Amino acid sequence: MHAVILGNGVSGATAALRLRELRPEWRITMVSGETTYPYSRPALMYVFMGHMRYRDTKPWPDSLWADRRIELLRGWVSEIDTKERSLKFEDGNRLGYDRLLLATGSRPNLFGWPGQELKGVQGLYSLQDLALLRENVKRARRAVVCGGGLIGIELAEMLHGLGLPVTILAREEWYWGNILPREEGRFVSRMIVEEGFDLRLSTGLSEILGDGEGRVRGVRTSEDEVLDCQLVGLTAGVSPNLAALEGSGIPTRRGILVDRSLRTEVEGVFAAGDCAEIETGGDRNLLQQVWYTGKAQGRVAAASLAGIEERYEPGIWFNSAKFLGLEYQVYGEVPNRPGEGRRHLYWEDFEARRAFRVVEEGGAVCGMDILGGRLRHRVCESWIREGRRLEEVLEGLGEACFDPEFFPRPVERIRKEIREVAG
Amino acid sequence: MNQIRNPLLQETLFDEEADDFAAPVSPLPRRVTPLEGIAYLLLVLGSGGFLASILGWIGGGWGSFLFVFGSLTAGGVLLPWARYGNTSPGVKNDRTFFRGISTRGITGWAAGVLLTGFYVVLYWRSDLLEGGIRLVDPLALVLTGEEAGKWFLYGFLYSLAVLLFGFRMILRWRGNPYQILRTFSVIFFQLGLAFLLPHLLALFEQPEFYFTYFWPLKTEYLWPSGFRWLASHPGGLGVFMAFWGLAMTFLATPVLTYFFGKRWYCSWVCGCGGLAETMGDPWRHLSNKSDAVWRIERISIYTILAVVTAGTAVLWINSAMEGGLLGTLSQGFAEWYGFLIGSLFAGVIGVGFYPLMGPRVWCRFGCPMAAILGLLQVKASRFRIETNGGQCMSCGNCSTYCEMGIDVRSYAQKGDPILRASCVGCGLCSSVCPRGVLRLGGRK
Ligand SMILES: Cc1cc2nc3c(=O)[nH]c(=O)nc-3n(C[C@H](O)[C@H](O)[C@H](O)COP(=O)(O)OP(=O)(O)OC[C@H]3O[C@@H](n4cnc5c(N)ncnc54)[C@H](O)[C@@H]3O)c2cc1C
Ligand code: SF4
């Protein structure tokens, strides 16, 4: 039995390793065009800033793959033939499979902006993008980053670190406005400005201007302002990477459609990670594009490939990020707008660079987020799962605090001030 | 929607293993700020003055002393101030792997050769340092009532380095209370208990005693000759010191390690650790993380522990038999141990190789105290580095900046707590982790 895993990101790599445990005798091949060995995508920025080398970002030692008899094949796949059960590579080679896992990840969104093909315009997703960025900064005296999200702020920080003046265009009223509630978004926006970035909120990109020689010379914003720049970062989110699937007959919508066991409709073909869209039977499918969900899906996909019945249960949502120096965590449901029947309780101390929010629904806490602090995952998860009351959560804040020793713990203050608001 | 194609790299597959992801070149060159310029000037003046005094070009006295060490101190304070004073308090992702000095480039090697050379001269050709030793006479006269010897000069330079690089460390990590407190602590113990106090003791005709070093790091304190020398010193202080040494080794070490882990000593108190945590900080990422080196580490450090323990036992038996066992050989053992371990390993390699192998070579491969503390840490301690559930995204910052060469990520990405004999609890993994996954102090 030959299992082929297309994509060596966290989903593909996790699946390969577990499949080896489950099926010691199978042949396993992991294919990727980007790199030979898996590396940690979230570490891209640190490589660019000289905080790590590329080799430091590999989660597993190179020798592991040979030890586990997982063949690593380098190349871009251009076609999938599900009848013949084979992959066709860009260089014309073919590789047959018995079971196929698609773990092709995402790609940066491009919204058909005029001028997006100019030199000096790029996204930040792959190691190739990083190499391209290094070329592009060579002539950049000013940069514009379009899209106020997590990758946008990372790209902005990388460029700013080189001494480049950076303008960030964000369409929303506050930073990361499609996810963050207003207060956190304003908090983050204010901090970004204080750190020396030119942040333009409620401002989109309408056109990228060329210099007549195919290079970018500026952008026109939705406010009809022209900003000179030699580098444009496009970071307006990502979408599932379906490039290899064209003509394959594997059903897709936004992502590759799979059931709870990550099976596509095509016999022997599975999908996991950023590229998978899980049909829930409800009105919204599940499209999860973060690291730990990729890892969790990779594990389930390995079982499915091996023919073992397992279901992907998403569990309590969690995400974390860093805006420049500011850490952010979210657990459960923290909607960005106030909604019917939900009560939001928010506390902040901008000077101390800390904020905290709890969301309550029908008397039970359903989510919380924190800026500038760390909460203990296990505790928050169990609170939300068990639907604890607000008072219990406030009482237990000390136990949930994951800040390092000697860090200020404003637990008492948060408790008191939130109680006052809650009445 | 179209995938962004990399126009530069379209033709061939990109060779990420060969690409070293070198420093991006920006057309806006990084300029040396006036403050940095002044700092460099002061450092050049100070080190030039020190060299001149060694070569005998300038004489001793307070004037020279203040000129040389005043310039070095001012430069050593100004430089980090110029670098970090204006930055935000968070982690500095600032080009560590792009600088020759921190990546075994030409300047890195030069620093290694210079440091190693200094130790070689200090141990075996200290006559060459005569002028430098005379330079610190004024201070030695005040503190000890006597002219300086080479160990006074060494202790003074060592303490100055801990102080100045400690200042840098505090500025660099000023958003991080753990790092700040820890750095204050090593400065205090080095300056107060490992430099000033022993000299003051000597001034008052008490034994020159280091309250922060114990057997088996300071082997002499529990060797028959050293123990008796202390215990027989007139006045109660000597006896107190002898028993202090005993109590620290056999009582305080296990108890403190049970509650706090090895770090109570290695990264908060110890002088060797103190220098590693301050002057060694710019090189901490150079420690090797491979399993093969981990294996060597365990063999080497436990061998040395075994030698010290056996040696100490034999020395006591020999002394009880009034030299019947070894005769004059016991003196030979003490001398050889002092030369091989104390000078060659702890000094020349331990500090000289900072810029080449990271700052904890001695602590990792050599120190018998670290070996005992490590065993206690694994077998009888509540100390753990806690991992926050499944939050690790395998970026590798923690492993990269672990000075002890622990592959922290390999535990964190499995969601496991980290418990390793060598962990000195410096807390840097937790400090550089961009997602706040690691927390020191977890209990069983
Ligand atoms: C800059 C950046 C920062 C991020 N930071 C975070 C973070 O802090 N936390 C977090 O949770 N998530 C973060 N993410 C998201 C996270 O990296 C992704 O969710 C995760 O990498 C998805 O893993 P995956 O295995 O599904 O896909 P990917 O990691 O995208 O891997 C897909 C692989 O498939 C290969 N592939 C695709 N198509 C083909 C083809 N046709 N032929 C050959 N190979 C192909 C690609 O080469 C690629 O290597 C970040 C993403 C980026 C870009
Ligand atoms: S630094 Fe943090 S996120 Fe990165 S590998 Fe280590 S524990 Fe994981």
Image (tube, coloured by chain):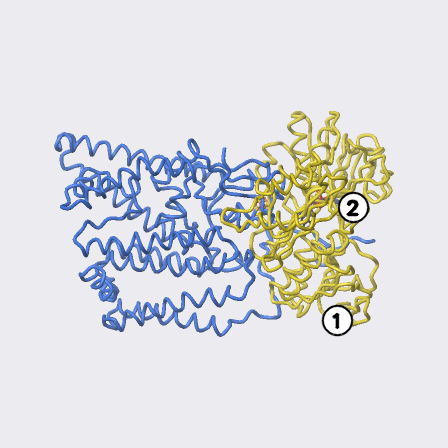
Chain colours: A yellow, B blue
Chain letter for the residue marked with disc 2 in the picture? A
Q: Residue at x 69, y 47 (%)?
A: A423
Which quarter of the figure has residue B228?
top left
Crowding around mark 1 (Cα neighbors within 10 Å: few <14, some 14 to 19, many 20+) is some
Which numbered disc flags the more N-terminal residue, 2 or 1? 1
Frontmost residue, B422 versus B271: B271
Same subunit under labels 2 and 1?
A: yes
Front of the two marks 2 and 1: 1
Q: Residue at x 25, y 67 (%)?
A: B135
- Vertical order, B182 against A378 (above or below): below
Chain letter for the residue marked with disc 1 in the picture? A
Query: Which amino acid type corresponds to the residue marked 2 in the rendered image?
Result: Pro
Q: Which mark is residue A145?
A: none
- Residue topped by disc 2: A240
Query: Residue B185: x percent and y percent?
Result: 39, 52
Left/right of residue A157 with respect to residue B82 in the rendered view:
right
Q: Residue at x 87, y 38 (%)?
A: A249
Query: Which amino acid type corresponds to the residue marked 1 in the rendered image?
Result: Leu
Query: Residue A59: x percent and y percent?
Result: 60, 42
Q: Secondary structure at mark 2?
A: strand
Which quarter of the figure has residue A46?
bottom right
Crowding around mark 2 (Cα neighbors within 10 Å: few <14, some 14 to 19, many 20+) is many
Q: Residue at x 78, y 38 (%)?
A: A87
Q: Secondary structure at mark 1?
A: strand
- Residue topped by disc 1: A227
Query: Residue B108: x percent and y percent?
Result: 44, 58
**How many numbered tags mark residues here?**
2
Specify the farthest residue to the front: A423
Quote the CA–CA distance across marks 2 and 1: 31 Å
